[in-house]
Image (spheres, helix red, strand yellow):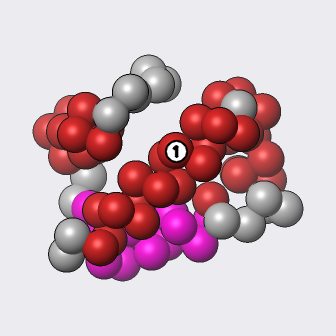
Amino acid sequence: MKTFTSFEEWRTAMIERARLTLDRDYCQERIDILGDETLPETKLFIKVYGITYHKQVFSWFQKALSQL
């Protein structure tokens, strides 16, 4: 997975390339998962991309949710 440097770049990739819908349910699901660093999925994300990027992506999901 490519790492993104801005919210707009990330949002565009999620919607246009990944064909995801950043709706309330999806954003909240990702926030819940990324917010729990004890989950295997979150541990793997942090291992692969690092804690700084993890926090950035978490904040982007929060921002996307707040814009709904």
Q: Is residue 26 magenta?
A: yes
Image location (x, y in percent) of residue 57? 49, 47
Which residue is at the far top? 2
Q: Is residue 2 magenta?
A: no
Write the start and end of the magenta stretch as one range: 22-33
Which residue is at the far left? 16
Which residue is at the far right? 38
Chief secondary structure of the magenta span? helix
Which quadrant, please, contains the C terminus? bottom left
Residue 24 visible in the shown view = yes
Q: Residue at x 71, y 32 (%)?
A: 50
Residue 13 visible in the shown view = no
Q: How many marks?
A: 1
Image location (x, y in percent) of residue 16? 15, 39
Q: Is residue 28 left or right of residue 52?
A: left
Q: Is residue 33 left or right of residue 59?
A: right
Say which quarter of the image contains residue 51. Answer: top right
The residue identified by callout 1 is 56
Say which quarter of the image contains residue 9. Answer: top left
Q: Could you say whether the residue bearing mark 1 is in a helix, strand or loop?
A: helix
Image location (x, y in percent) of residue 47? 78, 33
47 versus 43 height, above or below: above
Q: Residue at x 39, y 28 (%)?
A: 4
Nearer to the camera, 53 or 30: 53
Nearer to the camera, 22 or 65: 65
Q: Residue at x 84, y 62 (%)?
A: 38
60 versus 5 height, above or below: below
